[in-house]
Amino acid sequence: MATHFAVVLLTSLLALATLANCNVEGDILYEQRQAWEDPSNVLQSWDPTLPDPCTWFHVFCSSDGSVVRVDLGKAGISGPLIPELGGLQHLQHLELYANNITGSIPATLGNLTSLISLHLYDNLLTGAIPASLGAVRTLRYLYEFWSHYKRLNGNMLTGRVPPEILSLVLVGNLAELNVAKNNLEGTVRSSRRRRDRYQ
């Protein structure tokens, strides 16, 4: 009897923890929605009164209910990225390419230690590339037709590419770093494993 009670209690606690995690992730995404202009209403389903964000369009969750992908490429959204996005602990794919996203890349994105792909190209991002992204050792690639990229190109980023990010090509999982078509200082190199080419 005592064993059965312990199992039920543990199961209930795990369910509550999962629900709490989903609510936190939903709060973060809803706060991001509030910071964006959304003329096409692609974020209309991002309703904070729902129990979790897994039913929202453009949001994908794992089997345990954690947000693992946000897919908003070419969605017509504009506005900044909020620092709170760094709290999406289980996020693996952040697809925000070809919008009108402005402001800087939050340094808190370096907290996304499960992140595999980051698509920020063809926006209006400004400022420096945060060195904190170099802490995301899981970054591997971004899909762009047949190629695998980590793309930040086609913005208005300034400064230099931090060595912490360049090191991901050598010691991390990064297949390619492409920061062309920005306002970066010095020589910008697009690096691939086994072969390099200059942009």
Image (cartoon, rainbow, N blue to C red):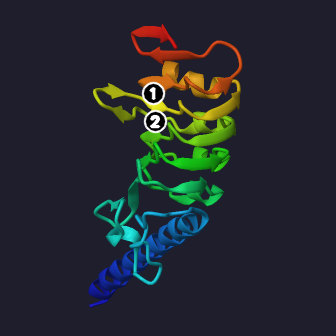
Compared with residue 49, is residue 80 higher up or lower down, i.e. above or below?
above
Residue located beneath label 2 in the image? 139
What kind of residue is marked 1?
Answer: Leu
Residue located beneath label 1 in the image? 174
Whether residue 161 is visible here, answered yes or no, is no
User: In the rendered image, which quarter is residue 163 located in?
Assistant: top right
Measuring from the top left, give residue 101's x and y in whole percent.
Answer: 57, 49
Measuring from the top left, give residue 99's x and y in whole percent.
Answer: 49, 47
User: In the rendered image, which quarter is residue 107 located in?
Assistant: top right
Measuring from the top left, give residue 80's x and y in whole percent.
Answer: 62, 54
In the rendered image, the residue lying farthest to the front is 39
In the rendered image, the residue lying farthest to the bottom is 1
Q: Is residue 111 left or right of residue 195?
A: right
Q: Which mark is residue 46?
A: none
Foreground of the two, 23 or 103: 103
User: In the rendered image, which quarter is residue 60 located in?
Assistant: bottom left
Rounded to the nearest angstrom, the CA distance separating label 2 from label 1 is 6 Å
Q: Secondary structure at mark 2?
A: loop
Badge 1, how many Cα within 10 Å: few under 14, some, many 20+?
A: many
Compared with residue 186, is residue 112 higher up or lower down, i.e. above or below?
below
User: Residue shown at 46%/54% (left/top)?
Assistant: 76
User: Residue shown at 48%/64% (left/top)?
Assistant: 39
User: Residue shown at 45%/27% (left/top)?
Assistant: 174
Compared with residue 59, is residue 185 higher up or lower down, i.e. above or below?
above
Q: How many marks?
A: 2
- Quadrant containing the N terminus in the rendered view: bottom left
Q: Secondary structure at mark 1?
A: loop
Whether residue 23 is visible here, answered yes or no, is yes
Q: Earlier in the sequence, mark 2 or mark 1?
A: 2
Q: Determine contact: label 2, label 1, CB under 8 Å.
A: yes
What kind of residue is marked 2?
Answer: Leu
